[in-house]
Image (spheres, grey):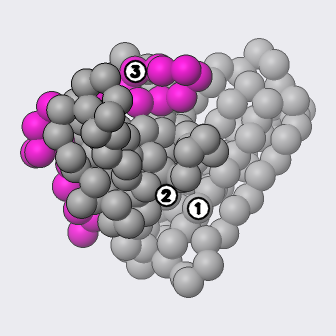
Amino acid sequence: MKRYLFGITAILLVVTLSACQAASTEPEVIVITSEVTVEVVVTATSEPAVLSDSTPTPDLPIVTAVVGDWLLPEDAINHIGEVVAVRLDKVYCSFQSRSNGTPTFCNDQPYPEHNFTFVVWGEDWSGYDGACVIVEGEIEEYDGKAQIEVDEEIQVQYCP
């Protein structure tokens, strides 16, 4: 019965999102895990709406549905090995001129509370600091965090 109710709830959420999509300028994210966590963010209003249901159903598969062209930084860790785009609403960049390889690290949140980093080796890209950017590349895991190594400027774009 729980699975049936969950299925109906998920279908209703998808239908609701489809109806709201025309009014929204930002993508919506639905995440369904084995704990049946459903998170819906609709940005048609000034404040996002977040709905969740934590009813345990251990035999359901993990499904991540992303509507739009990018992932949220906190979801990137679930996509190791995939080539994706990740949106960072405000990037925190630091050029490490005295470190081996002279990297620029750009995080979604200040270090060490970040979920995601993009790193550029041998160049100062700290000019992106404070900007909203979308980074594209293969997700790797470094020290338990999601990361993309950026080789070309075309991989980083300012948010529309």
What residue does disc 2 label? Answer: 28
**Res. 81 image quadrant:** top left
Q: Kindly report which numbered mark, 1 or 3, lies closer to the viewer in this rendering.
A: 3
> In the figure, 81 relative to 44: above or below?
above
In terms of depth relative to the viewer, which is nearer, 35 or 10? 35
Amino acid type, residue under disc 2 in the picture: Glu
Residue sitting at 34 percent across and 29 percent down?
Answer: 99
Q: Is residue 24 left or right of residue 3?
A: left
Mark found first going from the N terminus, 2 or 3 = 2
Q: To which residue does mark 1 refer?
A: 41
Residue 24 visible in the current orientation? yes
> Residue type at mark 1?
Val
* Residue at the extreme front: 98
- Which stretch did the figure color magenta? 137-160
* Left or right position of 73 against 137: right
Q: Is residue 158 magenta?
A: yes
